[in-house]
Amino acid sequence: MMRDHIIGEDYELWDIVTYGPLATTKKNAEVVDVPKIRADCTVEDLKKWEKNAKAKKWLVCGLGPDEHSRIQSCTTAKDIWDTLQVAHEGTPQVKRSREILLYSQYENFTMKEGETI
């Protein structure tokens, strides 16, 4: 659902949520890419910053008060998305354990004495 709302606003925002912020870098004296500071930004760089902020806003505005404490320390939309995924779906190991537990409960499901359908 959240994915559809974000894509409906701007498809590129979903890429930012899933792959990370659009980079604004420059070469330093050692010819290594480093993040630009505000003073070094072009109009195009500022549009990238705006897209990153917009993606983060879409995620944050869709959350309830309980979720805000989970994502307080997140700095990017991708960080927020990854944190929420782990919180609600769990890691792959947790998902697998949950599947095994549910399957086991299903297999062991029986009526108790005195229960009727």
Image (cartoon, rainbow, N blue to C red):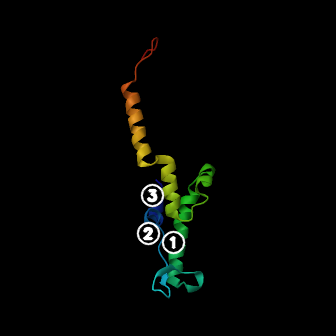
Left or right of residue 63, residue 78 in this image: left
Which part of the image, by quadrant, shows the C terminus? top left
Q: Mark number for residue 3?
A: 3
Name which residue type carries label 3.
Arg
Instruction: State how far apart marks 2 and 1 are (Cα).
Output: 8 Å
Within 10 angstroms of label 2, few (less than 14), some, or many (20 or more) residues? some
Q: How far from the left and from the top, in percent, is residue 115?
A: 46, 14
Against 116, residue 81 (above or below) is below
- Secondary structure beneath dot 3 equals helix
Q: Quadrant of residue 60?
A: bottom right
Question: Which residue lies at the image location 41% right of the left edge and 48% below the top edge?
Answer: 92
- Secondary structure beneath dot 1 equals helix
In this figure, which residue is indicated by the disc labeled 2?
Answer: 12
- Secondary structure beneath dot 2 equals helix
Within 10 angstroms of label 1, few (less than 14), some, or many (20 or more) residues? some
* Label tally: 3
Question: Which residue lies at the image location 50% right of the left edge and 47% below the top edge?
Answer: 88
Left or right of residue 27, residue 38 in this image: right
Instruction: State how far apart marks 3 and 2 are (Cα).
Output: 12 Å
In this figure, which residue is indicated by the disc labeled 1?
Answer: 51
